[in-house]
């Protein structure tokens, strides 16, 4: 038991020392074009408000039918950044692919039926303001526009039956917000950790028939999508030489003086 505790203490000291060296070493924020490779986890909530429209003289009624989806995300980032002392600003284009999907189904007297929904790719354009409390550390936010592709398909029955809209793909455009922090290992490589939230405006889809209640019923679905992501981004900076020199970087020794 003592050996295990000693081993854990040593590992903790090594890890702490490693990050202490990274943080206290002198460096500077990059300036110029950059490219990143990102990966992470995301969840998406598909909020569906369903309005059932029965034949006259009955009145319409509504209920919620939500779907929580989960998946992994990977992608690339391309951007250009600049720094003025401790203040930072970047413009960034991001493209991702996702494995985010979720299935809702049920088995009743009508058989097994349900819906499968996916959110499988996005493209976003953002501005990223930030501040550097120390030369190697960057705290930043994200504000931008995001485009995504949402897909819905009926399972277990013919498309459009049993109260679900027919199979469809829907391009959605919304807003993306985020916060994060980055660590600069040197003027050419950094690593960032980020939380993002995306919101998309409501859109409608019709269901031709809702026979669970009445064969003559129709339905109107209101979809609201929201997405949360936890991301890690490894960034390669094509830092301008003049910026490096201005911050005391020696091109011969590849270190700060």
Image (cartoon, rainbow, N blue to C red):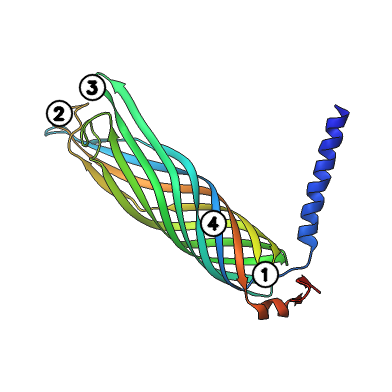
Closer to the eye: label 1 or 2: 1
Q: Position of residue 191 (x, y in %)?
A: 64, 57
Q: Left or right of 205: which side holds 77?
A: right
Viewer-nearest residue: 72 or 196: 72
Closer to the eye: label 3 or 1: 1
Q: In terms of secondary structure, where does tag 3 sit?
A: loop
Per the rendering, the mark at residue 29 is 1
Q: Quadrant of the C terminus?
A: bottom right
Q: Quadrant of residue 102?
A: top left
Closer to the eye: label 3 or 4: 3
Q: Earlier in the sequence, mark 4 or mark 1?
A: 1
Judging by the rendered image, the residue that carries numbered circle 4 is 178
Judging by the rendered image, the residue that carries numbered circle 2 is 215
Closer to the eye: label 3 or 2: 3
Q: Left or right of 81: which side holds 21?
A: right
Q: Position of residue 91 (x, y in %)?
A: 52, 69
Q: Earlier in the sequence, mark 2 or mark 4?
A: 4
């Amino acid at each position: 038991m003592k050996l295990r505790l000693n081993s854990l203490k040593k590992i903790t000291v090594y890890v702490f020392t490693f990050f202490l060296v990274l943080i206290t070493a002198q460096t500077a924020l990059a300036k110029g074009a950059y490219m990143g490779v990102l990966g992470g986890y995301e969840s998406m909530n598909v909020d569906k408000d369903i309005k059932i429209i029965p034949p006259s003289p009955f009145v319409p009624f509504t209920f919620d039918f939500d779907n929580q989806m989960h998946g992994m995300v990977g992608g690339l980032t391309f951007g250009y950044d600049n720094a003025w002392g401790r203040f930072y600003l970047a413009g960034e284009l991001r493209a991702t692919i996702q494995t985010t999907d979720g299935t809702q189904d049920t088995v009743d007297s009508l058989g097994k039926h349900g819906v499968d929904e996916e959110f499988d790719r996005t493209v976003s354009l953002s501005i990223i303001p930030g501040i550097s409390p120390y030369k190697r550390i960057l705290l930043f936010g994200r504000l931008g526009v995001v485009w995504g592709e949402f897909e819905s398909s009926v399972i277990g029955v013919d498309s459009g039956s049993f109260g679900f809209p027919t199979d469809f793909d829907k391009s959605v455009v919304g807003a993306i917000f985020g916060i994060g922090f980055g660590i600069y290992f040197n003027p050419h490589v950094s690593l960032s950790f980020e939380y993002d939230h995306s919101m998309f405006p409501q859109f409608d889809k019709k269901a031709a028939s809702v026979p669970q209640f009445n064969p003559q019923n129709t339905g109107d679905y209101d979809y609201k999508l929201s997405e949360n992501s936890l991301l890690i981004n490894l960034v390669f900076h094509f830092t301008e030489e003049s910026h490096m020199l201005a911050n005391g970087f020696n091109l011969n020794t590849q270190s700060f003086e």
